Each structure stands twice: as C-alpha cells, then as structure tokens.
Image (cartoon, rainbow, N blue to C red):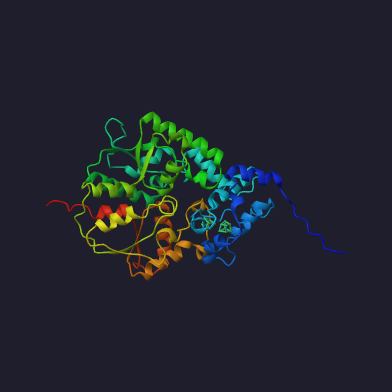
Amino acid sequence: MTDEIRLQLDDHMYERLAALTGGAVAVCYQCGTCTASCPWGLVREDYLPVRTIIHQAQLGVPGWQDNLWLCTTCGQCEALCPRGVKIIDIFRGLRELAWESNHVEKGLPSLLWSVYWSENPWSQPPSQRAAWAKGLDLPVFDATQHEILLYVGCTSSYDQRAQKIARALVSTLNAAGVKYGYLGNEEPCCGESVLSVGNKEYFKEIAGKTAAVFKEKGVTDLVVISPHCYDVFKNHYPMAENYLKPKHYTQYLADLISEGRLKFEVALKEKVTFQDPCYLGRHNGEYEAPRQILSAIPGIELVEMETNRSEGLCCGGGGGRMWLETVNAERFSNLRVKQAEKTGAGTLATACPFCTVCLEDSAKNLPPGKMRVKDIAEIAAQALKKPRE
Ligand code: SF4
Ligand code: SF4
C-alpha cells in the first residue's frame, strides 16, 4: 500500500493574496536569501522561515499562519532579495487574510480596540494627549502663521521615555527660531500601528479621517518625530499625496543647519554610534540627515557599528512587535547594543521612539553607565547655545 500525501490547496486564499499584494508572491524563485538574512535567525533556533511562508502562499497551502506575527517589517530581506519581491507587502497581505479568518496573535485585537476607543495604540485617554507639553506654552497650529506643523505622534505623546524626545525637539526648534504649531489633544493618530498588523480596511478609515483633519486645518508641511509616522504619511496616504509634505525631524534639522538657522555651541565630547531606524533608512532611503546633525555638533566623534545603513540591524519594535511580548533572549536590540559596545562608543544614538525604548531596555543588560541611549533630538538639545550669563 502506498502512502498518500494530500495537499490541501486553498484557491480562494491564493487569489485573495494575489489581489491584496499585486501578485507579489508570484515573482519569488525560492532562493532562500530572505530566510538567511532575516534577523530572527540570529536570536532563535526556530528562525522565521520566510521562503517557506512565501512558498506556502504561492501554492495556496496552509501553514503560513504560524510565524506570521514575528515579522518586524524591518526590510532586511527585501533589501537583499534578488527578485525584488515585495516581501513586506506579502506579510501584510497574509496578516489581512489572518484578520479575515480570526487567526490573529493574542493582544492584537485589544490594540485595535485601543485605537478605536482612545485614538492611540497605548490605551491612554485622548484628553491626556498633550500632557507631554505641559509648561511649554506651545501655540496651536495656524496655517497663516506657522511654517510647519509639529506632529508628535502617539508614542512621543504618551510614552514617558519618548515624551523627552518631543520636549527636546521643541527646545531645538525654538533655538532655531522656527515658527511652528501643534494640534494638542486634537492631534489624530496616523494609523501606522493598524497598518503594520495588517488591518488595511481599518487603516484606510483612520487615514481618511486624519487626512481630512489636516486638510481642514490647512496643514501642508509637517515635521514628525517617528519614522513610522513619516513612512505612513509619505507612502500610505494616497488621499493626501497632493498636499501633504511630511519630513522626518532629522531631515528638517539637517536643513536648518545647512541654512544657518540652527547652530550648536556646546561641545559634547562623546563617542557616538548611530542606529539607523528601519523606517527612516531601508524604507525611505534616509541615512545621511541623522549623521549630518551628529557631525555638526562640536566634540562628537561618530563611529559606525559593524552593520549600518542598509544593513543595519532592526531594534525589533516594528511590524506591530511593540505590542507583542518578545522574550529577553530573543530581542534583536540586545544584539544591537552589543554591536554598539564593540565600537567603544558610550552613546548609542537613534532617531525613532520605538528604537529608543527597545534599545534603552536592552542597554540595561550591560554594566550600569556603560551605554547611554539617546535620540538625536535629545543630543541636539544638549548642544544648543550656552545660557548667557
Ligand atoms: S529572497 Fe526573494 S526570491 Fe529568494 S526566496 Fe526570498 S522572496 Fe523569494
Ligand atoms: S522584514 Fe525583517 S523580520 Fe520580516 S521577514 Fe524580512 S528580514 Fe525578517
């Protein structure tokens, strides 16, 4: 008697995925570069089988659900794929299918409820959104008076560590004499957390509402703190692409330095290495602006880690992973902090609230005081003018 192997093909799944991703899976020729380059292989014996997941999606066979929520959407695999496969689109498409069949990781439905009820993924009251700015006396955005809208984003509004980044950026904008305003408690969520976990329908609803708020207030130029907000406004807001001109704050500060509006007077005497946030670097090709700012600060010696720019290691916080538990032994940020330590730097700089939170947590594994984690906005604020006597 011969053993019979039965494959359960799901034509509907294949067709839906092809429609959701513009046929992205079809291009893959199964070389395995993606699996080999994925950082999960550095921290888990049970790595993320990217090639296999894509193959299962190509054939329309089940199995892909198992590791779907591990992907941090870091883009490392896409950067190296010889066929230019849109691997992140495939993961997002599969996640969308998983929502349709209720196969989602525990913890994610409450993330969506939080965005629905509280308009932020941190389950914090909307009435406290502007609490980070207490005492700063910030003006509410007025398109007739202001050069830019400072878009703070949910993480820098509510997370206590990230709030310090927002306050530091305010000092720097003030020092450069920028005319800007913010939206206070009325600032809407950009929806990135919802997009990253693959609920595209709900994301479109949020994006439509947020774009309408910007239009009504006359917002065109906005400067954002998180590369995740930047990416979503730049690449996923088709309804606003004709009028919205987002900039990441490092790009804006680098421009202010070139124009002679922002000057640093205080020498910091620090050896600094820089973590490229995936959504600033690999997703949007911006590697230079953060380095230009660091290089403009007197006393800073900038050194690079063994992997940097397009090969830089992800902190582990993207793709919805900020809202899922990652055991300590499997955190990419632990490896990144060790890479930073090897450079001899005492400061690990980054330009993303997710990176700051993840890396600072991992730096606690090193001896106390060995590695400071700072956002570039904080470093810039420290190097501003000396107070006049
Ligand atoms: S690297 Fe690209 S072509 Fe190779 S298996 Fe992965 S997705 Fe397919
Ligand atoms: S995007 Fe990053 S985490 Fe996701 S499969 Fe590719 S390399 Fe792995």
Q: Position of residue 120 (x, y in %)?
A: 46, 42
Q: Residue furthest right?
A: 1
Q: Nearer the viewer, residue 76 or 214?
A: 76
Q: Position of residue 341 (x, y in %)?
A: 37, 69
- Left or right of residue 71: residue 375: left
Q: Position of residue 101 (x, y in %)?
A: 66, 44
Residue drawn at point x = 39 percent, y = 45 percent? 157
Is the residue 9 above or below the residue 308 in the image?
A: above
Number of marks in the image?
0
Is the residue 173 above or below the residue 48 in the image?
A: above
Q: Nearer the viewer, residue 219 or 24?
A: 24
Q: Residue furthest left?
A: 389
Q: Is residue 319 visible?
A: yes
- Left or right of residue 164: residue 114: right
Where does the N terminus fall, quadrant-wise? bottom right
Residue drawn at point x = 32 percent, y = 43 percent? 133
Q: Image quadrant of residue 4? A: bottom right
Q: Is residue 367 visible?
A: no
- Left or right of residue 62: residue 243: left
Q: Position of residue 172 (x, y in %)?
A: 26, 48
Is the residue 103 above or below the residue 304 in the image?
A: above
Is the residue 3 above or below the residue 116 in the image?
A: below
Residue drawn at point x = 24 percent, y = 57 percent? 297
Q: Nearer the viewer, residue 22 or 351?
A: 22
